[in-house]
Image (cartoon, rainbow, N blue to C red):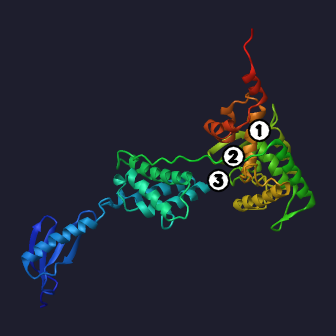
Amino acid sequence: MTGKSPNAKKQIKHLRRGLSIYKTGRSPFWHARLYDSVKRRYVVKSTKETSRLDAAEVAEEILADYRAKQNTNHAAQKDRSFEHYAHLLSEMTRVQKKGARNKYAVSDEYKILYREGDGVVSYFGKYDVGKITSGMVRDYLVFLDKRRDKPLAPSTKAKQCMMIRKVLMIALEDGVIDIIPPMPKHRAKDAPRVSFTEAEYKKLLEAARTCADRGDKVRGVEVTREHYNLIVFAVHSFLRPTETELFGIRFCDIETKDDPKHLLMTLTGKTGYRTSASLEAAVDIFEKQRELHAGAASTDFVFMPEYANRTTAVNTYRRIFNHFLDEAKLKTDKDGNARSPYSLRHYALQTRLRKSEGKVNIYWLAENAGTSVEQLERFYLKRMEPTGERVRNIQSFGGG
């Protein structure tokens, strides 16, 4: 018959709820046992005392010290943790975007949530969703800035806050929390929408034609008239030079329409699904692309279809576009702001607003271009030089 284990408790003294002391046959010292209600487990520490009275006093000190170090904002149950709801959001997004062409939205969200070292989940993962406050979010943004040589841009901070809010919204829908704390506001400084003047745009087209006819090479890629076509199509379609818009559109996404002549384009871009109408000049470019890729399938990309990876197509064209800018000496505007393929979209919107002399419906234009009236007013209208019609109106006098 085996004897009692030396670890068996010989003497037990309950001090109060969740705290007791006991002795075993293995040690002359009393041990303190306290209950962690957050983690739902017992914690045992030696008091280093042989006297029961002294051990009871030390046990109280151990409990006080333990609670002082304990983060009471952490979730007691995993299904109340921020990490749990972040995982739910990630899974919901993945399912919703499954098969969608705009797969980049999923990867961007995942990076913000699970970025190693300072991602949202890395920082808030163990927190109870009901105990996250505006102050905690503010502290997180300060934490991010401290880890970098330069503070994050206001727009980047806004994305972190938006992701925290989206996670908490799932908890709100589940009835776990009653309210989402206000997110810290960060006033973004509007970056200038670098564009072209009419003369500069013509100069760019001339440089692109010259480079294509000359057969220039940019990092081993030969410049062709297709790269020239991209410029004209971008300006007359208002498409963003991204994987999902200008470089994501396929032959089957475009229909040629009349009255007036235009292209009807179906795409899923930055602002989601939309149908968009082009200007008439884009029709001719589209026909040229069909001739250039005569054997293409309907599901092939209209521009640079030889690149299955559309990010590669975007990056390759950006380098070629920069070559055009170098040739035309148009790398920057008069204020030193660098131009990029996005400058074509800015030029397209500014030109439409300017040449219409106030006749274009800005709501329809915004909807067609996948933007908003607020964006048009904020970045384009207030920066435009007065049209002749506006100047004449300002100088007008009432009739006698």
Quote the CA–CA distance across marks 1 and 2: 13 Å
**Dot 3 surroundings within 10 Å: few (below 14), some, or many (20 or more)?**
some
As shown in the figure, which amino acid type bears the numbered disc 2?
Arg
Kindly identify the amino acid type of the residue bearing the numbered disc 1: Thr
Q: Report whether 396 appears left or right of 272.
A: right
Does dot 2 land on a helix, a strand or a loop?
loop
- Tell which tag, 3 or 1, sits nearer the viewer: 1
Q: Is tag 1's residue or tag 2's residue first in the polypeptide sequence? A: 2
Asked if the residues shown at circle 3 and circle 1 are in contact, with their CB atoms under 8 angstroms apart, the answer is: no
The residue under label 1 is: 351
Residue at image coords 76%, 29%: 357
**Mark 3 or 2, nearer chain start:** 3
> Disc 3 designates what residue?
101
Question: Which residue occupies the foreground of this view, 11 or 67?
Answer: 67
Name which residue lies at 32% across and 59% down: 73
Q: Position of residue 258 (x, y in %)?
A: 81, 34
- Which residue matches tag 2? 193
Which callout, 3 or 1, points at the residue further toward the start of the chain? 3
The part of the image, by quadrant, that contains residue 43 is bottom left
Seen from the viewer's position, the closer of residues 149 and 207 is: 149
Give residue 149's position: percent from left, percent from top. 55, 64
Look at discs 1 and 2 and give the one toward the viewer.
2
User: Which label number is shown at residue 158?
Assistant: none
- Where does residue 204 sit, x and y in percent of width and height? 84, 50
Number of residues whose C-alpha sits closer than 10 Å to that of mark 2, classed few (under 14), some (14–19) or many (20 or more):
some
